[in-house]
Amino acid sequence: MGFGSYDESEQENQQSDSEYDEDDVLNVHENDHEGEVSFDTDASQDELIGRLQDMKDDEDDE
């Protein structure tokens, strides 16, 4: 086969984007959760802000 040519037999068994099985569909809301997230730390707010600033500075260096 030359450049730009194709074998039509390869095209016979392909599904178009509009054809799909219902089992193939992903429901992005299947595992939605409502609630709160909390954590305990011994670090003060100033220490955490300092760590965040260090991470930002490291990003800027790259």
Image (cartoon, rainbow, N blue to C red):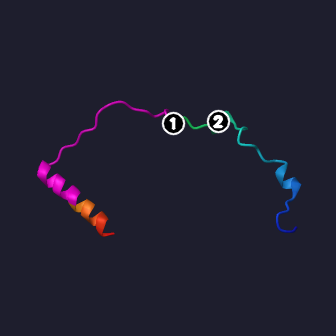
* Location of residue 26 in the rendering, given as x and y in whole percent from the top left corner: 57, 38
Label annotation for residue 23: 2
What is the magenta range? 28-53
Whether residue 13 is visible: yes
Query: On the picture, is 45 further left or further right than 6?
Result: left
Comparing marks 1 and 2, which lies closer to the viewer?
1
| Residue type at numbered disc 2 | Asp
The residue that disc 1 covers is: 28
Count of numbered marks = 2
Mark 2 or mark 1, which is nearer the start of the sequence?
Answer: 2
Query: On the picture, is 53 further left or further right than 3?
Result: left
Based on the picture, tell me whether residue 33 belongs to the magenta stretch.
yes
Q: Residue at x 85, y 48 (%)?
A: 12
Based on the picture, tell me whether residue 37 belongs to the magenta stretch.
yes
Q: Residue at x 24, y 39 (%)?
A: 38
Q: Residue at x 16, y 47 (%)?
A: 41
| Residue type at numbered disc 1 | Val
* Location of residue 48 in the rendering, given as x and y in whole percent from the top left corner: 17, 52
Query: On the picture, is 6 further left or further right than 25?
Result: right
Label annotation for residue 60: none
- The secondary structure that most of the magenta stretch takes on is loop
CA separation, marks 1 and 2?
14 Å
The relative height of residue 27 versus residue 58 in the rendered view (above or below) is above
* Location of residue 35 in the rendering, given as x and y in whole percent from the top left corner: 32, 31
The relative height of residue 24 versus residue 2 in the rendered view (above or below) is above
**Tag 2, which secondary structure?**
helix
Q: Quadrant of the C terminus?
A: bottom left
**Tag 1, which secondary structure?**
loop
